Image (spheres, grey):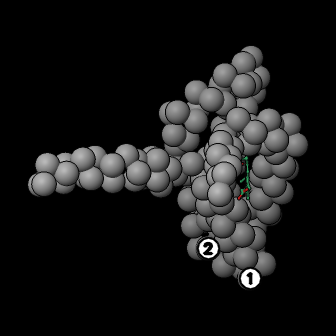
Amino acid sequence: MNKKLPIRAAVLVLALAPTAAMTGDAPSLKEIMQGLRNDLVEISDGLLTDDFKLVAHGATSIAEHPKIPAAQVQLVAAELGPDMAAFKQLDNFVHDLSLEISAAAQALDRDAAVSGYQRMIEACLDCHRTYKERVAAVLRPEPEPQSDL
Ligand code: HEC
């Protein structure tokens, strides 16, 4: 009778495994993007309310955004092929701009911060215009199988 227990435990582990894989420590690209959105809003708020600390905080957090999980990088690289270099370059460009905005905010240089902010929005949208649909399509989780019930 108690032999059933390990089987139940194994079934439970199998049932939980996909959830654990999806909600593990490493955020997905989509979750990273949602973080970038919040950081960008922080920069906007900071610029609109003359709060340079907030600007620097948002910019630094964009600079330090988590890495895309390796499994997703592989999927993206397989989809983009030779375009992967340009994709990475856009990511690096946003990274460099975030450092520029953070430095400008710390120097209380409004013009430089605003200029970096405007170029950053263009860079975010540039990547979205060129790659978002394509990349989102390969990262989208498989739809749940239809139940017969
Ligand atoms: C190098 C390319 C690239 C850059 C640069 C980029 N994004 Fe994205 N972004 C993507 C991709 C790809 C997706 C789609 C991810 C998915 O659906 O799995 C996305 C999706 C998003 C989403 C939608 C998330 C959702 O819930 O569907 C937001 C918000 C977002 N990005 C914000 C930003 C902001 C803000 C910046 C600039 C600071 C930025 N992105 C820069 C590639 C990029």
Above/below status of 21 relative to 50: above
Above/below status of 77 relative to 27: above
Please tell me how crowded label 1 is: few (under 14), some (14-19), or many (20+) other residues with Cα within 10 Å: few
Front position in the image: 65 or 142: 142
Residue at the limit of the structure toward the top, as seen here: 82
Amino acid at circle 1: Thr
**What quarter of the picture does the C terminus occupy?**
bottom right
* Residue for point 64% across, 64% down: 39
Q: Which residue is mark 1?
A: 49
Say whether mark 1 is within 8 Å of ligand 1: no
Residue 136 at x, y percent in the picture: 74, 42
Residue 2 at x, y percent in the picture: 11, 54
Name the side, left or right, on which 66 lies relative to 125: left
Above/below status of 5 relative to 41: above
Q: Which residue is mark 2?
A: 54
Q: Is residue 34 visible in the rendered structure shown here?
A: yes
Front position in the image: 29 or 12: 12
Give SS at disc 1. Answer: loop
Question: In the picture, residue 37 is in which quadrant?
Answer: bottom right
Q: Is residue 115 visible in the rendered structure shown here?
A: no
Amino acid at circle 2: Leu
